[in-house]
Image (tube, grey):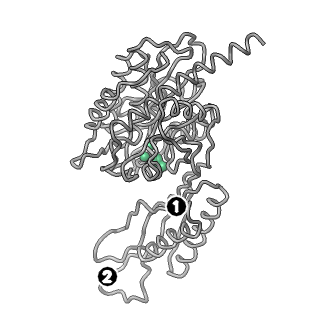
Amino acid sequence: MDNLQINGPRLWDSLMETAKFGGTAKGGICRLTLTDFDRQVRDWFVAQCEAAGCTVTIDTLGNILAQRPGRDNSLPAIAIGSHLDTQPSGGKFDGILGVLGGLEVLRTLQDTGYETHAPITVIDWTNEEGSRFAPAMLSSGVFAGVFDADYANSRQDRDGKKFGDELDRIGYRGTVPVGSQRLGAYFELHIEQGPILEDENKEIGIVTGVQGMRWFEVTITGRDSHAGTTPMHLRRDALLGTARMIEAIHALALVEKPLAVSTVGLVEVTPNSRNVIPGSVFFTVDLRHPDDAVLARMEQQLRDDIARIAAASGLESTVEQVWDSPAVHYDAACVGAVREAADHFGFSHRDIISGAGHDAAYMARVTPTAMIFVPCRDGISHNEIEYSAPEQVAAGTNVLLRAVIEHDRKEHERRQVRAVS
Ligand code: HGY
Ligand code: MN
Ligand code: MN
């Protein structure tokens, strides 16, 4: 069984079939976490895993864990995971490729009768994106002990709906305590979501870590007043102040170029009326850098710039940090398994640090972890035109399959050596 391979057309069919759950007219997906579309894709995934001979459990945060037994089920499972939720204007591959790639591994093991030593568990993590309920990677974070379950359940979306209530509403609050499963390793397949692999014509990214990232929520307060009767020098325009802050937030990343990035992605203006000078603005800030010390410097600059601009504009400001995910380095043995798998198939590859956050970033805190990237066209993601070709997603899934079974085989050999020594 040295040349086990996945069924590429079956994987592609599943990717295209599940794209209908929240599919958009432009060919993307809007499947926000804990919506009815999320429930529909979850129901589909559970049924497919059971059809592939797995036992499916749901934990108390709605994480779905589908386990295929191995020869020795007392061993901690080797996990494969990612997420089924998407951005509001998401694509067909972000997250779901990692979950369906895991399902394809399970199906291939079932088809061929290949028996691993340890059980294999494929996981769908609730609310990886953090778009509806901040922060991102919320449920893998609880599994890894970063957040507690009460904090997760209390998180509210911008309409005031609570994570816990929405989880109950779609019927996916399970009984297995989140984080109770011991895992022996964790592998995640994902599109790169950036341009590097495509620019360098590399088929596989050997992901060695994830950059640090911090999220902030900012409220700027001025004074609502009449657009026609308020002289320019008497205005306390929260949106004008915000515009100057957004410019400064962009500039602070350029100071730390080439690796720093900063983004203001969500802005809410109140009262948002064309003839009222805005008295209040809520906006979000996303800062990232591979070096935590630089990220801390960027945060300080952010706070200084907002305070300076608010004071100069007669505005009040509050800045709340809502997420801090430090830079992550993946496990050398697991990264080695990915590299060996890419070499086994003769795929061109390069080491890469992930610019995007992933559940694997938190899993690395509790079990040896690595990731596999495949290119996406023009490096575009978090966009309805996101695309990876059938041969690209098949290559990544073959590397996932090989890395998992080789890691399982080597761990078995290590246990045997330990047993006789
Ligand atoms: O924000 C991220 O990097 C991920 O897509 N949730
Ligand atoms: Mn993702
Ligand atoms: Mn994403």
Q: Is residue 133 visible?
A: no
In this rendering, the label closer to the viewer, 1 or 2: 1
Q: Amino acid at mark 1?
A: Val
Which residue is identified by label 2? 227
Give the secondary structure at mark 1: strand
Give residue 261's mark: 1
Ligand 2 lies in quarter: top left
Measure the C-alpha gap from mark 1 to mark 2. Answer: 35 Å
Q: Is residue 126 left or right of residue 75?
A: left
Residue at (39%, 20%) from the top-left corner?
107
380 relative to 135 in the view: left or right: left
Q: Residue furthest front?
A: 346
Q: Residues within 10 Å of mark 2 (few under 14, many from 20)?
A: some
- Quick one: label 1 or label 2, which is nearer the N terminus? 2
Q: Residue at x 23, y 49 (%)?
A: 26
Q: Residue at x 56, y 44 (%)?
A: 351
Up/down of 257 relative to 168, above or below: below
* On screen, residue 92 above or below 11: below
Pointer 1: residues within 10 angstroms few (<14), some, or many (20+)?
many
Please determine whether, in this image, residue 180 is positioned above or below residue 158: above
- Out of 141 and 84, give the one closest to the viewer: 84
On residue 181, which mark appears? none
User: Is residue 368 shown left or right of residue 401?
Assistant: right
Quarter of the image with the C terminus in it: top right
Location of residue 175 in the rendering, given as x and y in whole percent from the top left corner:
48, 23
Q: In the image, is the residue at mark 2 within 8 Å of ligand 1 by its beta carbon?
A: no
Is the C-beta separation of discs 1 and 2 under 8 Å?
no
Q: Position of residue 297 (x, y in %)?
A: 64, 64
Say which of 367 and 11 sits in front. 11
